[in-house]
C-alpha cells in the first residue's frame, strides 16, 4: 500500500523561517533530507519525494472568464503552516508508514535538535479489493 | 497457458517470444545456480542472458536449443563476473594467488549435457524464504521464477525501477545471510514453505486482479503470471490439494474479470454482472480442478474458497446461485481459520438464505473485532442488508460510511452512487 507523507512547516517570512537558521543547521537539515531519501530507496520503500518552493512563491489560481487563469499573488494570508514537501512510500502496513513519518518528523531544526513537525499521513487511492 | 480474456490483458499479453523466455527462466536459473552454488549471482546472470535473448532472438531467430543457449550465455556472464572480481582483488593485493586460477575455469557450459530437470519448485521455495518480507518475496518470485524484468515488476506495482531493484537485491542478500542453500528443504520444512509459496502466488494474483479494474493497460498482467506459476506448482505437485485448489480459485475468479467493470472503469458487483461475459472455458477447468481436489480428502482453505467461487460461476443467472451451499462452505471455512472477513461473507450468504435480518445479526460481533470494526466492507455489507430490508435511510448512512473508509476510488464511486440513488428515492 502506498502512502503520502506530508510535511507542513511554519510559514516564517514566506521562507518557512529557514533564513534565520545558522548555515550549519540548514546544512544539517539538507543533509538529513538527502540521507533520508537514500535510506528509503535502499529499503525498497521509496516511490517519490519532492520539496516545495517556499510559500512566498506560491500563487493562487482560479478559472476566470472563459476558463482563463485568474492569478492572485501570494498564498492564503491566514494560513500559518504550509506544505513544505512530501514523500510517497510503498509499504506493507499503515504502521510502517507511521514509522517512516516519525523519522521524517525528527528532521533537525535551527538548533540541530529534532523539530518533531507534524507529518500528515494519507493512503494513496488503490485498486478495489478482490470480491469473494 | 490459456490466453486470458479482456481488452486489458490482451493489450498487456506477452508475445510468444517473451512467453518462451518466461517459461525457460526457472529451468535456466536452476541449472546455473546448481552449477555455481551462488543463487544471487546466478539470478543476475540469468537476467542478463534474458535481456540478450530478448534483443537477439527477434533479430536472429530462436536458437535450436533455447534453454542451452540461455544457460551458456548466463554461465559466461557469471564467469566474466568472477574473473573481473578476481582481477579487482588482484589489483588490490599483491598476492596473486595461483590457486585461484582454477576458479577461472568453471566447467565450460556447453561441454556437459545438462539433464533436463525442473527446478521451479526449488526456486519458489528459495524465493519465498521465511527471512523475506512479503513484498520482497513477491518481487523475487516474479523475477527469478516468472522471468519478468525488474522494470516490468516495478511497472506492475507502480514503483520506481530503482526501488524494485533494491527490493530484489535485498531479498537475495537476506537469503544468502540466512544461509539458504540451493537444495530442497527438509520434509518437515516443506509444508510450511509450500504454504508460503502458495500465499505469495495468491497475493500476486490478487494484485493483478484488483488492478484489472483500473487503468492498467501498460502493466504486466500479474494475474495471468500468477495462474501460470500456480499451474507449474500443480503440475509438479499433482497430489497436493491446496496447490490444485489455489489454481482452481484463480481460474474461477479470473473467469469473471471481463464482467467486473464497465468500459469506463465502473465497478460491477457480482449480482449485476453480465454472466455471458464470463470465461466458460476457465470455469469448466476450475470446476474440474476443485472437484478433483475436494475428492481427495484433507480439505484446505484454498479448496473451499475455490468451491465457493465455483458456486457463483456455475449459476448462469444470479437467482440460480446455490446460497445454501455457499453458506455451508463459509461455515466450513470459518472453522478452519480465525478471520473476521470470513464471518462477513458468511453473513452475506446467511442473508441470502435466511433473510437480511439474519445476516445483520451475524455482523453484530464484528464491531468488537479490531481487525474489521473500521473496515469499509463491514459498513458496505450493512448498507446492502438494510437496503434489502427497505430501511433506506440507514442504508444511505452505511453506504456513505463505507465510501468514507475505502481507499479505492472505483469502489468509493460505486458506494457513493448507491447512496445517492437511494437518497433520491427517499425524496
Image (cartoon, rainbow, N blue to C red):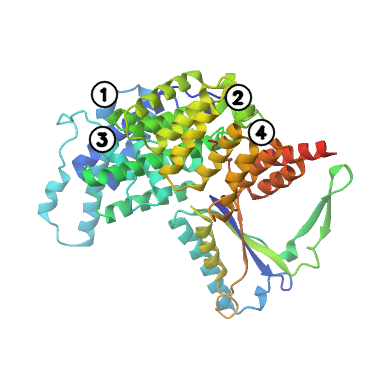
* Between marks 3 and 2 in the image, the one whose residue lies nearer the viewer: 2
Which quadrant is the N terminus of chain B positioned in?
top left
Which residue bears the numbered disc 2? B318
Q: What element carries label 4?
A: loop
Work out whether A67 lies above or below B118: below
Q: Which of marks 1 and 4 is nearer the N terminus?
A: 1
Tag 3 subunit = B
Work out whether B323 lies above or below B98: above
> What's the residue at 31%, 28% (across, down)?
B235
Q: Earlier in the sequence, mark 2 or mark 4?
A: 4
Q: What element carries label 1?
A: loop
* Residue B185 picture location, percent across and down: 23, 45
* Residue B427 picture location, percent across and down: 85, 39
Q: Which mark is residue B119?
A: 3
Near-viewer residue (B290 or B138): B290
- Asked if badges 2 and 4 are on one and the same chain, I answer yes
Q: Is residue A118 left or right of residue B243?
A: right
10 Å crowding of disc 4: few (<14), some (14-19), many (20+): some
Q: Is residue B98 left or right of residue B418?
A: left
Contact? badges 1 and 4 (CB < 8 Å): no
Q: Is mark 3 on a helix, strand or loop?
A: loop
Near-viewer residue (B301 or B356): B356
Question: In whole angstroms, how far apart are the C-alphas of marks 4 and 3?
Answer: 42 Å
**Does residue B198 show up?**
yes
> What's the residue at 82%, 51% (across, down)?
A62
Question: In whole angstroms, how far apart are the C-alphas of marks 2 and 4?
Answer: 20 Å
* Residue B330 picture location, percent across and down: 48, 37
Which residue bears the numbered disc 4? B266
Q: So how many labels did they put on this image? A: 4
* Between marks 1 and 4 in the image, the one whose residue lies nearer the viewer: 4
* Between marks 2 and 1 in the image, the one whose residue lies nearer the viewer: 2
Amino acid at each position: 500500500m502506498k502512502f503520502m507523507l506530508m510535511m507542513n512547516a511554519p510559514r516564517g517570512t514566506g521562507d518557512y523561517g529557514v533564513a534565520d537558521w545558522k548555515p550549519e543547521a540548514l546544512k544539517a537539515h539538507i543533509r538529513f533530507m538527502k540521507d533520508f531519501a537514500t535510506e528509503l530507496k535502499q529499503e525498497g520503500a521509496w516511490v517519490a519525494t519532492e520539496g516545495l518552493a517556499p510559500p512566498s512563491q506560491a500563487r493562487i489560481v482560479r478559472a476566470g472568464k472563459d476558463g482563463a487563469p485568474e492569478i492572485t499573488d501570494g498564498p492564503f494570508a491566514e494560513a500559518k503552516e504550509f506544505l513544505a514537501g512530501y514523500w510517497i512510500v510503498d509499504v506493507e502496513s499503515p504502521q510502517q508508514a507511521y514509522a517512516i513519518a516519525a523519522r521524517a518528523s525528527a528532521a533537525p531544526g535551527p538548533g540541530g535538535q529534532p523539530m518533531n513537525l507534524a507529518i500528515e499521513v494519507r493512503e494513496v487511492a488503490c485498486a478495489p479489493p478482490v470480491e469473494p | 497457458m490459456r490466453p486470458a480474456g479482456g481488452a486489458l490483458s490482451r493489450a498487456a499479453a506477452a508475445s510468444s517470444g517473451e512467453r518462451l523466455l518466461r517459461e525457460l527462466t526457472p529451468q535456466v536459473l536452476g541449472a546455473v545456480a546448481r552449477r555455481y552454488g551462488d543463487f544471487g549471482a546466478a539470478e543476475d546472470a540469468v537476467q542478463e542472458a534474458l535481456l540478450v535473448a530478448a534483443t537477439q532472438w527477434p533479430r536472429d531467430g530462436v536458437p535450436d536449443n533455447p534453454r542451452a543457449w540461455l544457460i551458456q550465455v548466463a554461465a559466461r556472464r557469471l564467469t566474466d563476473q568472477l574473473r573481473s572480481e578476481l582481477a579487482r582483488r588482484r589489483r588490490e593485493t599483491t598476492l596473486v594467488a595461483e590457486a585461484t586460477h582454477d576458479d577461472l575455469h568453471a566447467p565450460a557450459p556447453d561441454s556437459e549435457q545438462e539433464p533436463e530437470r525442473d527446478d521451479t519448485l526449488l526456486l519458489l521455495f528459495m524465493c519465498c524464504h521465511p527471512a523475506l518480507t512479503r513484498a520482497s518475496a513477491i518481487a523475487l518470485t516474479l523475477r527469478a521464477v516468472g522471468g519478468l524484468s525488474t522494470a516490468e515488476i516495478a511497472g506492475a506495482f507502480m514503483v520506481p525501477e530503482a526501488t524494485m531493484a533494491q527490493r530484489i537485491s535485498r531479498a537475495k542478500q537476506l537469503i544468502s545471510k540466512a544461509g539458504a542453500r540451493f537444495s530442497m528443504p527438509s520434509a518437515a520444512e516443506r509444508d510450511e514453505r509450500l504454504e508460503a509459496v502458495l500465499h505469495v502466488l495468491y497475493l500476486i494474483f490478487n494484485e493483478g486482479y484488483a488492478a484489472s479494474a483500473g487503468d492498467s493497460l501498460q502493466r504486466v498482467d500479474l494475474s495471468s503470471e500468477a495462474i501460470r506459476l500456480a499451474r507449474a506448482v500443480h503440475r509438479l505437485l499433482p497430489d497436493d490439494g491446496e496447490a490444485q485448489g489455489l489454481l482452481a480459485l484463480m481460474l474461477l475468479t479470473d473467469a469473471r474479470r471481463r464482467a467486473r467493470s464497465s468500459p469506463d472503469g465502473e465497478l460491477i458487483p457480482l449480482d449485476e454482472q453480465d454472466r455471458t461475459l464470463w470465461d466458460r472455458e476457465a470455469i469448466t477447468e476450475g470446476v474440474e480442478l476443485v472437484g478433483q481436489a475436494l475428492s481427495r480428502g484433507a480439505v484446505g482453505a484454498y479448496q473451499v474458497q475455490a468451491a465457493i467461487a465455483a458456486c457463483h460461476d456455475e449459476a448462469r443467472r444470479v437467482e440460480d446461485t446455490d446460497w445454501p451451499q455457499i453458506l455451508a462452505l463459509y461455515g466450513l471455512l470459518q472453522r478452519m481459520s480465525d478471520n473476521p472477513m470470513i464471518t462477513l461473507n458468511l453473513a452475506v450468504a446467511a442473508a441470502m438464505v435466511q433473510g437480511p435480518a439474519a445476516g445483520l445479526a451475524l455482523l453484530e460481533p464484528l464491531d468488537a473485532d479490531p481487525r474489521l470494526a473500521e473496515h469499509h466492507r463491514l459498513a458496505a455489507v450493512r448498507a446492502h442488508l438494510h437496503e434489502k430490508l427497505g430501511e433506506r435511510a440507514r442504508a444511505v448512512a452505511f453506504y456513505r460510511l463505507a465510501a468514507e473508509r475505502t481507499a479505492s476510488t472505483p469502489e468509493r464511486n460505486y458506494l457513493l452512487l448507491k447512496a445517492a440513488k437511494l437518497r433520491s428515492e427517499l425524496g
